Amino acid sequence: MLISKYEGSRSFQTGIPGKQRPQFTMKKSPLAGDYFDEMDHRKREAIHAVLAELASAGVIEVTWPRFQEGRQVEKVYLNFDAIPRAYELAGLVPRAEQLRRLRQVLAPLASHPWEWVRRWWAGVDAALARRRAAGLDLEDLEGYGELVKVLLALPELDDIIPERIFSQRVLGDSKAFEQRVKKRLLALLKRYGPEEYETDEEYLDSVGLTDNPKMVLVAGPFIIRVGKTTVDMGELPGGLGLAAHTVRAMEITAVAARWVLLVENLTSYYQVVQGGSEGAVPCRERGGGRGLAVEGPEWAAEDQEKTVAPPCFPGTVGSADTPAGETWRRPAGLVVYTGGFPHRGVQLFLRKLQDYRESPGATARPPVYHWGDMDYGGIRICEYIRRNLIPDLQPYLMDVTTYTRYLPVGIPFGDEYAARLRHLSEDPAYAPWHPLLQAMLKHHKWVEQESMGPGATPPVLPP
């Protein structure tokens, strides 16, 4: 009790004994219940015996009310010069020593290659130097030692790695990361990391960790080369899933797509790839160009009159463009599933796509669009991809007109969510989004991609 008071005092913070010693009043102390128990005076006698022993050792000083000496304790003081002895008698490691040891454990992070880790370390180290715990558990040096090992190992990863394999490799136990380090790492990423993500999974992926490897889902006409093998991906109805290792080894040599569409959510991705809905009919049958026209009240006639070249996806049957004996036709666009913030495999694919688009030998440079939720996350995902991967990325079906059309199926949000949107609406980096953000703040609703339904599957994209 006295040691705790000392550790919370200014005398401990400065390392200089103050005018007032750590103390407690018996009547207000946790001992009061036992000390003043009139049914069992042996408790008071036991407390007196312990206090007398500590006083004779010079650790404490006891004061008594007038005429009550030896009968009722008034106050107990801890002597500054006896503090080391007090720790020894209590069987405790001095707090100053705990702080010193923790600083030593964290010291390797001072030269960490990631700025945000160095920033966290600098703040914590400064607090520990001032004899403040900085919210850390001083009793868990081993746990912070494991955290340091993990933080030092992450920049060395060449590829995404399953958590358990990483844990076995770095900590010698396949479950140690999940059980003892993961929670702390996530807390650091969320508070100090360079990017704000939507899920724990995305935070971990950003540093190269995953529960299980993920595929890159893509559909559309493009050609890759791996070594001496060339594969035309446009010949695969429904698209395919590429492993990250495949993406790393391949080179995109041709893209026959007239446009590229990045889709945030899996349901919407499949709707786009499969052609939207059963209401889809060949555009030639409706007087349009090659592609799909999607029937439904969601798209007004005046909107359809402005169309140029709707996308065409696998699953369209009976078109004049379909070769005899085939039940599908080559899609006009390339569709990529991002799954929220794109994981490392998708990021690598998009970088290779951008490399192709920027290469002198590219036969075409198809425009790239992003279609996602009209919400805080969807807007930030689109900006993340534009800022880091596709500089000329354009949002698709993420505007005030589309938002207003689907407002009846919008999802209400509260003040806390509104504050996050307001923050974006005041950020110059999100200036192109300000009209949509202001509309969302006005109606206090966000629109998820899936709620727009099959009828909202993009009916038109520029050729």
Image (spheres, rainbow, N blue to C red):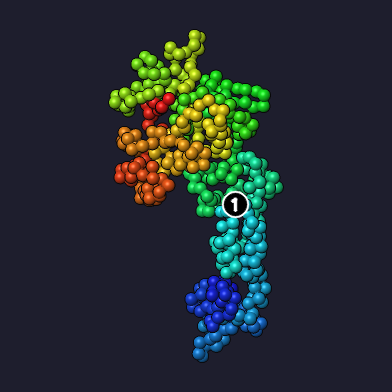
Residue 262 visible? The answer is yes
x, y percentage for residue 445? 34, 42
Task: Count up the numbered dots.
Answer: 1
Observer able to see residue 71: no
Q: Quadrant of residue 70?
A: bottom right
Residue closest to the eye, 81 or 324: 324
Q: Residue at x 52, y 78 (%)?
A: 24
Name, please, the residue furthest toward the bottom.
67
Residue 314 pos. (x, y %): 48, 20
Q: Could you tell me which secondary element the residue under label 1 belongs to?
A: loop
Which of the 4 quarters of the picture holds residue 42? bottom right
Q: Amino acid at mark 1?
A: Trp
Q: Looking at the figure, which quarter contains the N terminus? A: bottom right
Disc 1: which residue:
114
Query: Could you tell whether 389 is left or right of 289 in the image?
Result: right
Residue appearing at x 45%, y 42% in the figure: 383
Q: Is residue 23 above or below residue 372?
A: below
Which residue appears at 50% of the width and 29% of the height? 365
Which residue is pictured at 48% across the width and 76% down the height?
28
- Left or right, residue 142 beside residue 70: right
Please provide percent x and percent y for residue 302: 29, 26
